Amino acid sequence: MGPIPAKRIKTLSVARPIIYGNSAKKMGDVKPPNAPVEHTHMWTIFVRGPNGEDLSDIIKCVVYKLHETYPNPTRTVDAPPFELTETGWGEFEINVKIHFVESASEKPISFYHHLRLHKYHNADASGIKIENDSGNTDVESIFYDEVVFNEPNEDFFKVLMAQPGYVLPSNKTEKTVFSKQLAREEIDRINIGISKVDEEIEVLKEKLSVLTKS
């Protein structure tokens, strides 16, 4: 008989901030020995904390699925800083799949990141982006997000609370409190709107009165 799973904490959610994306730089004449001749850029895709924090307390591994032209396009990174460095010449969509630590008992999450290698001017009249290679060729495409764990188990909740995170309000109480608050705010907005309309009507009546007398 296996171990009894940890009890989940009902009506509670915890959010952990992450950033994901890629950095890229145009290579010069000196290239890595294994880089194909046609490759022009070196790039790194990553998943990490907003300030470079180690996320191995919640993430077991990150699987990156590259373009099919890469050898072994499905790459698994099982240690922080959960980043993968490659070379290439074109931009494409990378599937990112985050697997959480076993104690979390959470399903993996999956999303896409568009690998960006070039800097662009605004689109020209034809709508085509124009590459800007002047000056610094370093490129970054980084996004902020929050992973929300709904009703985490008690053991994993302790892990989440050991690092900066956000405990979201209880689902049960929030519906009651905020529905009443929103109703009051909506009534106030309606009353203010009615007052403004009444004022405008009076102003228009006065203008109409002046025009009919003249």
Image (spheres, rainbow, N blue to C red):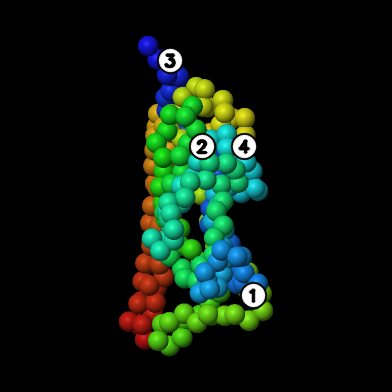
Label 2 close to label 3 by CB (< 8 Å): no
Mark 4–mark 3 Cα distance, whole angstroms, equals 29 Å
Tell me the CA gap for discs 4 and 1: 41 Å
Q: Quadrant of the image for the C terminus?
A: bottom left
Residue furthest left as drawn: 212
Task: Give 108 or 64, whichever is nearer the viewer.
Answer: 64
Whole-Å distance between the Cαs marked 2 and 4? 18 Å
Disc 1 element: loop
Above or below, 63 relative to 35: above
| Amino acid at circle 2 | Lys
The amino acid type found where label 3 is placed reads Pro
Q: Nearer the viewer, residue 125 or 84?
A: 84
In percent of width and height, residue 90 lies at: 47, 70
Residues marked 1 and 3 touching at CB (< 8 Å) = no
For label 2, count other residues whose C-alpha is less than 10 Å away and answer few (under 14), some (14-19) or many (20+).
many
How many marks can you see? 4
| Res. 17 visible in picture | yes
Q: Residues within 10 Å of mark 1 (few under 14, many from 20)?
A: few
Distance of label 2 from label 1 (alpha carbons)? 36 Å
Q: Is residue 124 above or below residue 110?
A: below
Residue position marked by numbered label 4 in the rendering: 164
- The residue that mark 1 highlights is 28
User: In percent of the image, x 46 and y 43: which residue is there?
Assistant: 98
Looking at the image, is mark 2 or mark 1 nearer the viewer? 1
Which badge, 1 or 3, is on the more N-terminal residue?
Answer: 3
Give the amino acid at mark 1. Answer: Gly
Write down the residue under mark 2. 60
Q: Which mark is residue 3?
A: 3
* SS under mark 4: loop
Residue 206 falls left or right of residue 25: left
C-alpha span from label 1 to label 3: 56 Å
Q: Residue at x 64, y 43 (%)?
A: 53
